[in-house]
Image: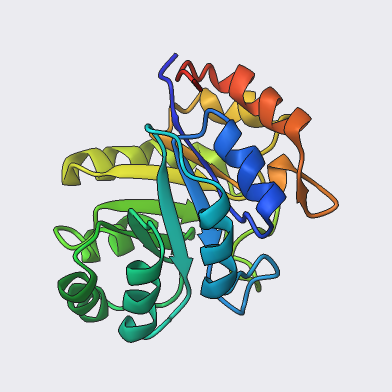
Amino acid sequence: MKQPLLKFCGNHSLNDLALSIQSKAHFIGIVFAKESRRSVIVSEAEVWFRKIGLRAYQKLVAVFVNSPAAVIQDAAMRLPIDVIQCHGNETVDEIVDLKLQVKKPIWKAIHQDQHTVFKMRKYEGVVDGFIIDTKTVQWGGSGISFDWKHIPLYMEEAKRQGVHCFIAGGIGPDNIDHLLAYEPDGIDIASGIETELKKDPVKIRQIERKAGVIYETT
């Protein structure tokens, strides 16, 4: 079985962040968007990172929803951000401009529908990765999955573009085995490793074990 990259997202407290950093996740996500119930402000995250740091193999992904480039650039200057994830309706031109300003890899979230591959192609050569998420009224972290039978098409398109493609939406210990059968490049989880909106170490260990993640955490 292909070993997927793991992204544990939606960390909105110091305890959440500590649990995710102690995990074997390759990417740690924090949401800086008021539209999300897991939203964090930059000054709060600054305090956390004065108390705790990422492991050597981990990267910090900062999630924004239709934020001005100046806001994202300010966050990138104040936090150890490795990747910018644009999770809104950002256009190709907006992302090109953002990339020039922040000079960091950018991932684009695509809300899954019958036009997903077409939308991925619009960003070819512009973004450095994709997050395919369920289309819902809220921006991410919905706990709702889409029909995974389409995943091979998204993986094929990402491979053609030479970038990674993560699958998000409604993934947890109870259904990750089914998802793994489609061999996604990466898995993006927020609500699936939570209990009452807080990161749950038991669910984190279950996800790691089922995904077969073998990164050392020392």
Question: Would you identify the image quadrant in which residue 202 lies?
Answer: top right
Quarter of the image containing the N terminus?
top left
| Residue at 24% from the left image edge and 44% from the top image edge | 163
Q: Give the colour scheme shown.
A: rainbow
* Observer-nearest of 111 and 34: 34
* Observer-nearest of 198 and 124: 198
Q: Residue furthest right?
A: 196
Question: In the image, residue 193 lies at what x, y percent?
Answer: 70, 40
Task: Note whether residue 95 is visible.
Answer: yes
Question: In the image, residue 75 lies at what x, y percent?
Answer: 40, 72
| Residue at 69% from the left image edge and 57% from the top image edge | 13
| Residue at 42% from the left image edge and 61% from the top image edge | 109
| Residue at 51% from the left image edge and 37% from the top image edge | 149
Question: In the image, residue 32 lies at what x, y percent?
Answer: 53, 71
Question: In the image, residue 133 lies at what x, y percent?
Answer: 52, 55
Up/down of 175 relative to 214, above or below: below
* Observer-nearest of 18 and 116: 18
Task: Note whether residue 174 is visible.
Answer: no
Q: Residue furthest front?
A: 50
